[in-house]
Image: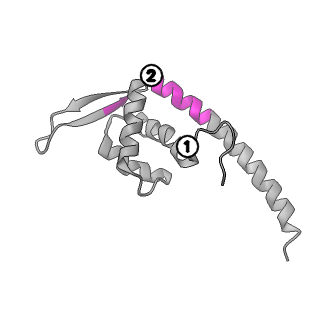
Amino acid sequence: MRRHRGQRGRGYRARMLEPALLLLMQHGPAHGYTLLNQIEEFGFRNIDPSLVYRAMRQMEVQGLVTSAWDDTETQGPPRRVYHLTSSGNDVLDKYIGELKGTRGMIDRILDAYNKHTSGSKG
């Protein structure tokens, strides 16, 4: 599929990473490794961990999440724990609204396709 004007070269899956991570953090603070494992429930299979950590850093710069070192672990080095901010929750709400609109558009396209192709096969 070719890229069209206005698209920044990010695939559809990559654009879904941020809202998926924000949604996971809405359930409570989480380590990056935990988020990496939980993101699979949204269809992100075999995702490069650097993409998740890069997204987390970018969202922290944007003020959507905060992080702090968790040194309560008794084994291994301290790990960073990410928390959703109120701004992050607001952005998640906007993403969900956009996704609902996109789902409606996708449904209409698929319905039209199915109507068009159902009569031509057979």
- Secondary structure beneath label 2: helix
Q: Which residue is mark 2?
A: 86
Whether the magenta-drawn stretch holds residue 92 is answered as yes
The quarter holding residue 71 reads: top left
The reply to whether discs 1 and 2 touch (Cβ–Cβ < 8 Å) is no
Which one is closest to the eye, mark 1 or mark 2? 1
Q: Is residue 63 left or right of residue 12?
A: left
**Three-letter amino acid code of the residue under disc 2:** Ser
Height in image: 73 above or below 49? above
Q: Which residue is mark 1?
A: 10
Provide the residue span drawn in magenta: 82-97
Tell which circle, 1 or 2, labels the residue nearer the N-terminal end: 1
Whether residue 38 is visible to the viewer of this picture, yes or no, is: yes
| Residue toward you, 5 or 45 | 5
Height in image: 27 above or below 90? below
Whether residue 27 is visible to the viewer of this picture, yes or no, is: no
Which quadrant does the N terminus fall into? bottom right
